[in-house]
Amino acid sequence: MRLGCVFTQTSLDEAGRPVRDSNSTTYVSGLLNSEQFGRLIKAEAVRRGARKARRVVVLSDGANWCGKAAAMNFPRALHILDFYHAAEHVRELSRAIFGEGRKATVQFKAWRRALLRGKADDVVRAARELTGQAAEPDEARRQIAYLQKNRPHMQYDRYRREGLFIGSGVIEAGCKTVVAQRTKRSGMFWGQKGLEHILALRCLKLGNELDAFWDYIFGLTKTRKAA
């Protein structure tokens, strides 16, 4: 199951933080491979006016398929790695190097602050120098490779100066409100078609488009009867 959303942002709050435009979020979901889902989210973005937007931003968790889908469907968009996913990898990196305990916690907090200041290169460089003494060297190298690969998408100081979102909380919440609350409760069992149909309706409802959908469906029915 894949889930994505499209929203607009035109303002900041009093503290200079980005604010989603009210009622601007629409969702798409489906049991789709990455190529199919990439086309689906692109179609929704185009429908919502992406081709006329002053700027298009793709915010993802850094999964390989997300990067490929973004490059294929939004080649000119700014791609940002969700800061909280990046920070979680830094947490795991700290543990891999120092093990469990206060030293790992202190290092994680320092590296997290460095990420916010746009110093991902410094974090990667420092971690590489420590791999020789790591508690779990293979895991440390794996986390370093993740950060190295995503360095172009971790310029958080720049994104914050430009008033852009650096967190994908809206989609994390959507996993619960769009999918889990309607399809994963106790006693619920779904076939593939039923699941996709109910989630399509769920996306329409939470995107404030359900009334327009029924108007369209009833309009088609009246047209066919008249014909």
Image (cartoon, grey):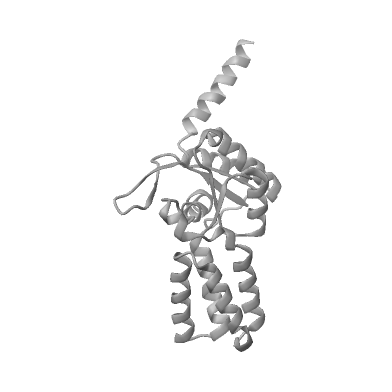
Q: Quadrant of residue 145?
A: bottom right
Residue 189 lies, with reference to residue 76, above or below; the image says below
Q: How many dots with numbers?
A: 0
Residue 168 lies, with reference to residue 217, above or below; the image says below
Residue in front for this viewpoint, 218 or 153: 153
Residue lying farthest top? 227
Figure quadrant of the C terminus: top right
Identify which residue is drawn at 55% across, 78% down: 126
Identify which residue is drawn at 60% across, 89% down: 133
Residue in front for this viewpoint, 120 or 74: 120
Identify which residue is drawn at 45% across, 36% down: 208
Identify which residue is drawn at 56% across, 25% down: 217
Using residue 191 as the reference point, say whether residue 81 is left or right of it.
left
Asked whether the viewer can see residue 10, the reply is yes
Q: Position of residue 19 (x, y in %)?
A: 38, 47
Residue in front for this viewpoint, 139 or 222: 139
Q: Position of residue 108 (x, y in %)?
A: 48, 77
Residue 45 lies, with reference to residue 121, above or below; the image says above
Q: Position of residue 82 (x, y in %)?
A: 52, 59
Asked whether the viewer can see residue 191, the reply is no
Q: Position of residue 182 (x, y in %)?
A: 51, 49
Residue in front for this viewpoint, 201 or 110: 110
